Amino acid sequence: MIHASLIEQDNARHLAQLTADYDALGAHLARRGIDIAAVKAKVAAYGVAVPSWGVGTGGTRFARFPGAGEPRHIFDKLDDCGVIHTLTRATPTVSLHIPWDKAPVADLLAKAEQVGLGFDAMNSNTFQDQPGQARSYKFGSLSHADAATRAQAVAHNIDCIELGVQLGSKALTIWIGDGSNFPGQVHFTRQFERYLEAAKQVYAALPADWRLFTEHKMFEPAFYSTVVQDWGTNYLIAQELGPQAQCLVDLGHHAPNTNIEMIVARLIQFGKLGGFHFNDSKYGDDDLDTGSVDPYRLFLVFNELVDAEGRPGFAPAHMLDQSHNVTDPIESLMVSACEVRRAYAQALLVDRAALTAAQDGNDALMATACLKAGFRTDVEPILAMARLEAGGAIDPLSAYRASGYRATVAAQRPAVAGGGGGIV
């Protein structure tokens, strides 16, 4: 992995400039009545999970172009995830996808300890057929017309819970590709009833301290109708299942111009915001790097999250979920983790008293100016100082490239042939 001496050497090149920038920003924020040390402490305590599958090369719906040093198995993935946290100090946990990442529990725990990671939410897979699987999910899983196929999908989700308990996870995330591609292919109501019936069986297997996250997507891979297609349906599911069920919001899986921050506010208001899959989108279901297209939208989401801090039971789970086809996945995930922290820091700078006064006084211009004041502030010195003090890199990308990690693992891991299609 990345040796501490290399990080220290790279940090030495940036330290004087960082110190000057941090002190200047501290003075600027002090004039606004903001304690930079308090903001830095909150940023340092904030972590976002990395998806195990994110360190591999993804792709478009038409092609996949594998990169050098592709991880061969979960243990290679954990090595890569460990590098991300070593440099950013922002990604302390990894989210596993089963059966892709299935391995002996003792081996997973030992490897996680070696690379300094814990385990976040478990992710089930009933959107693909696996080798040796008795029944196909081609026409659905938890909502399939065949009871035996639904039972197989339920059993898989319960297996994920049982594995997660042994790993120290506290949540199960369910996304299904169930839907239809042709009008009349399915009966919408009966299909949804079957989904709810099956999901209730999974919910019944949750330990008392676990949560169940359900994720909505407007499409992928069902293009005419999708069973869990929007936040309203997702909310209905969470209400039907019970208090341990909450909604997962994936920023990249909404139609263009959807007001995602308002969806977040609604789910917070009614206690059903479970967490996020952070990425970005230009058209829909794009899985682009977080903050790469619309960083202001990411900031507006965090504005709602900061506004809700301190509410009883408010503890959303945060995870990255991206598909990399033209970049080094480790680099993209590092940059995205930093972008999420950036949006959080910017939201912490919003003058909430002034914002509330402007809102209550119907002063639209001053209200949006309050938000812009936070968003326009360059908080990079806060992020970099938090990384430095935690033993990370002032400039994670610079340190990573200086380490030669990608070339090292490329020499150890066999090259993967291209030609595959579809987003992973």
Image (spheres, grey):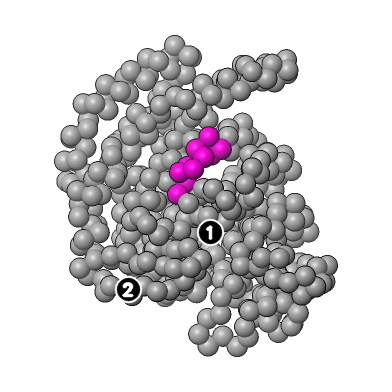
The residue carrying pointer 1 sits among few (fewer than 14), some (14 to 19) or many (20 or more) residues within 10 Å by Cα, namely many
Q: Which residue is mark 2?
A: 416
Question: Does dot 1 land on a helix, a strand or a loop?
Answer: loop
Residue 41, relative to residue 352: is it above or below?
A: below
Which residue is depicted at the point 50% across and 38% down?
A: 295
Q: Quadrant of the N terminus?
A: bottom left
Between 8 and 55, the one nearer to me in the picture? 55
Q: Is residue 300 left or right of residue 79?
A: right
Give coordinates of residue 145: x percent, y percent. Answer: 76, 79
Q: Which of label 2 and label 1 is nearer to you?
A: 2
Q: Amino acid at mark 2?
A: Val
* Magenta-highlighted residues: 289-299
Tell me if residue 179 comes above or below residue 270 in the rendering.
Answer: below
Residue at 38% across, 69% down:
74
Residue 50, percent from left and from top: 44, 55
Residue indicated by mark 1: 121
User: Dot 2 lies on which element?
Assistant: loop
- Does the image show residue 281? yes
Image position of 408 with respect to 104: above or below: above
Residue at 78% x, 67% y: name it: 192
Q: Is residue 95 left or right of residue 259?
A: left
Q: Residue furthest top?
A: 31
What amino acid type is highlighted by mark number 1? Ala
